[in-house]
Image (cartoon, grey):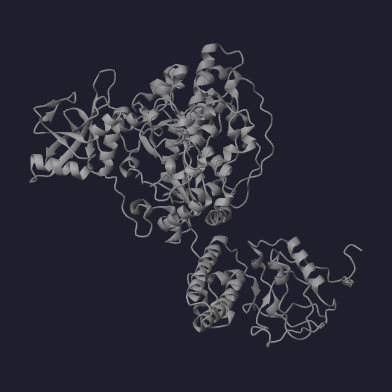
Amino acid sequence: MACMWVMDRVVRIFHSGSVNDNGEFVNMKEDVCTFGKSPNFSEVVARAKSIVGVGSELTLRGRFDAGGGGRAHYVLLNLKSDEDWTLYRECLKEAQVRCAEVVVRCGGDNENHEGGVNMIPLGNLVMAPHPLYPLLDADYDAKHRAHLITDNLQVLSVLRPRTHSAMRWHERYSDYIRRAGFLPLARIVNAGLPTMDGPALTALVDRWRPETHTFHLPCGELTVTLQDVAMILGLPIDGHAVTGFAQPHGWRDTVEHLLGIRPPEPAVNEKDKKPSGVSSAWLTSHFNNLDDNADEGTVERFARAWLWHLVGGYLFPDASGSTISWLFLPILGQQWENIATYSWGSATLAWLYRSLCEACTRTGGSPTLGGCAYLLQIWMWERFPVGRPDRGPAEPWPFEDEGSLPTVAYLWKNCVNVTGNKDRRYLYYTNEFDVITPNQVKWTPYSRPEIENMNLSPICKRDENYWRATIPLVWFFVVEWHLPQRVVRQFGLLQQPDVHQETTNRELHKIDRRKVRGPVDWVVKHQPYISLWDARERFSMYPYDGPAHRNGPYKEYLVWFHNNARVFIRPPVNIAELQESESDDDNDHMDGYDQATRESTQTERAPLHNYTASQLVRFGNDAGHALRHPQGSEKEVGALRAFAQKMRRSCRRLALKLNCITTPDCHEPQPSRSTSGRGTAPCSQQRTPSRSICRGASPSAATSSRSRRQSQSRQPSDSEEDDASEEHDPSYGQDIIASSQLGDAPAATQQSVRRAGRRRARDTSEVGSANILGTNPGRQKKKKNPYTPSGR
C-alpha cells in the first residue's frame, strides 16, 4: 500500500511524438513529474503546460496496460475533467504498470483514434447545476416526468411494462438449464408470475433519478441493488461481464446454426422489420411444444430456444416488447457450463437501470417500461406498502434438489391481482408515495423470519461480498454505475448525508444500439469499465460492515436530502399562510381545493398533507418567535397572547381545510324545511359527500364516537337547550365540528358546538357522508336510559 501511495505522486508526461498501432510510444519525449501528494487533474494540466508551453490548447490522454500474463494491451483514455482523472487512477490500480502515463498533444485533437489505439471518449461528467436541487442535473430534469408533473402541471399517461410469458416448460430441459446456472429462476418463472401493476410501477418510476440511480422519496433514497437481484431472481453476480462482439449482419445464420430453423428474411426491397432479433411469437410457434419422444439433440435445441426466450423476454425485454434480441446468441450458443460463468445478475441490473433512466423521461401517448419489470415490482412490494397486494401463504416447494431451491420471488406467487381504473390508481399511488414515511418502509426485508426460515437457493447469498461494491455494471452497449453507498440503510447501516456524488455519465446514456450501425466490439469500446469490473474483488466487502442505523442521525440525513432533492411530486394545495387574512368568514378562504371538495370531486391526499406540514412548520417558527422574550415580562405576555390569537384563527382555518368543519354549501339551492321535521337539513349542517374521501374515520369509528358523545350528555332529550353562549365562545354559532370525521380524536373533542335554541330534527332522508350511518326514517327511535349498561 505504501508503494501505491508513492506511485500516486509520480506522473510520466510524454509529448512531441506519436503512438503506433500497438500502443507503443514512438519518438516521445518523457518528463517525470513528482508531486508532494496525489495530484488532481488541474495540477497535472498545469505541469503539462509548463513542460510543452502554454501557447496552445492541450489534449491529454492517460495510458494504462490492461493486458495480463506479461502481454501488454494498451488503452488510452481522454482526460478532460477530475472525474476522468479519477477513473484513470482507478484503472491504474489493476494495471501491469501502475505509474500514470499522460500523453500530451498540442492543439484541440478530437479524434478518437491515434495509431490504431482505441481512444475512449468519456465525455463531460460535470453535472449541469439545477437552480433548486443540487443533487439533480438540470439537463436530465428538463425532460423528467417529475418536473413535468410538478412544475408544468402536466397529466401524463401510465407506463406499460414490457413483459413476456415464458414458453412451455418440459422437464427434460432441466439438466441443460441447470448446467447454464438458470434453474432456480426457471423454477420460479414456471411456478407462476404475478400480474404487472402498471400504475404502481409508474408512480415509482416518476421518482427515479438518472443522476444517482436511486428513487427519491420523502423517506430518503432507495434503489434496486445487486442484493435484490440475487435474492429475488437467484442470478449470479460473480462472473465475466455480459458483453462481446456485436455483428448485426448474419445473425439469422447464427439462429439457424443453433436452433435448426432460419428466421424469415425481409422481402426484396423491403426494410427489415426485425433487425434486432426475432419476434416472441415466432420463437413460441416453433419451440413451444417438445415431443415427449424427441431425441436428445432436439431436446437440447428446444432447451436453448427456451433459455433464449427467458433471457431476452424476461430479463432483458426492450421497450418494443415483442423482440427477442440476437445479442445474447454468441454467449448462449457456447457450452452450457460456460454460460454459467457470466455475471447475469449485474447485466440484468444494468439493463434495468438504463430502462428506468429512459422510462422516467417518456411522456408520449403510450409510454413503455423496459427492463426486468418483475424484479422491480417484487422489489417494490417487498419494501413499500404502496400497491402491495394481498398474498396467500406460500405453497410447499415441490423440488428437493439443491439446484432447484426457491428464491424470494416465490413468496409472491399467489398474490391477489389489483384491479381498477389505471389512471385513478396511478393518481392514488402517486399521492401515497408523496406522504410515505421511513417507518412505513421495510428497509431490510430479507431479514424477516419468513425468509430466514426458507430453504433458499445457495445462489441467493453466494456472492454477497459484491452487494455493496461501487462498480460499473456492463451489458454490451450499456454501462451503468452501481452506487450502494447512497442506500446503506437497506443493509441496516447508518446513512450519511452529503454522500460523494458519483456522477453518471450522460455520454454513456447516449450510447444506444439503435444509433450504432455496423459491427462493434463492446469489449474494446468499454475496456476501462470492463477492467474495473474484472477488478471487482478489490471492491468486495462484507455487506453489513459499518455503523448501524440510528434514527437521530438519519433525521439529519433527511433534512439534508429534502434540501437538495425533489421529494414531492404533488404540489401543495396552497402556499399562503393561514393567518395572513384577518377575515373570519370561511368563504373568504376558499381556493381550488376547497371548491373541488364542495362539488363532490375526488380529492388528493398528498397536496393537503404537504400543505398541512408546511403550516405546522410555520406554527413552530411563530412559537419560537413568541418565546424569545424574557420569561414573565410584559413583552412575553403580549407576544404569547398575539400568538395564541393567531393560532386560534389558523387552527380553525386548518380544520376547515381538513374538512373537519362544515360550512354552508351556498352553490346548492336549499329546499324549504318540511313540516314533519324530516326534510333536508339547513345548509349550515349539510355535509358534502366528497368530504369523506381519504378520511381516517371509518363508519364504525363514527358510530362509536357518537355513542360516547351521547353517553356523556346530561339528558337524552332531543329538546334540550344548549347552555353555550357567545359570551363563552366568540366564534359561537359560526361552524359545526363534524364528529363523525374525527373518529380517532379523544372523546372530549368529539362534542359538537351547537347553536342556541332548540335542536333541529336530524335529516334521515339522505345520508351525505360515507362516514355517517343512516337510520330508518319510518322507525321511531327508542329512548335509552343513560344509566342502563349497554346491551340490556
Vertical position of residue 788 compared to residue 271: above or below: below
Q: Identify which residue is drawn at 80% across, 72% down.
A: 712
The quarter of the displayed image where residue 766 is located: bottom right
Image quarter in which the C terminus is found: bottom right
x then y, percent, for residue 48: 13, 40
x then y, percent, for residue 485: 43, 42
Left or right: residue 758 versus residue 367 is right
Left or right: residue 75 versus residue 686 is left
x then y, percent, for residue 600: 63, 68
Q: Residue furthest bottom?
A: 727
Which is nearer the eye, 784 or 766?
784
Which is nearer the eye, 698 or 625?
625
Q: How many marks?
A: 0
Q: Residue furthest right?
A: 792
The quarter of the displayed image where residue 612 is located: bottom right
Q: Identify which residue is drawn at 35% across, 38% down.
A: 512
Left or right: residue 744 versus residue 215 is right
The quarter of the displayed image where residue 278 is located: top left
Vertical position of residue 154 compared to residue 749: above or below: above
Vertical position of residue 602 compared to residue 576: above or below: above
Q: Identify which residue is drawn at 71% across, 67% down.
A: 746
Is residue 167 among what the camera can see? Answer: no
Which is nearer the eye, 360 or 70?
70
x then y, percent, for residue 694: 63, 61
Is residue 324 among what the camera can see? Answer: yes
Image quarter in which the N terminus is found: top left
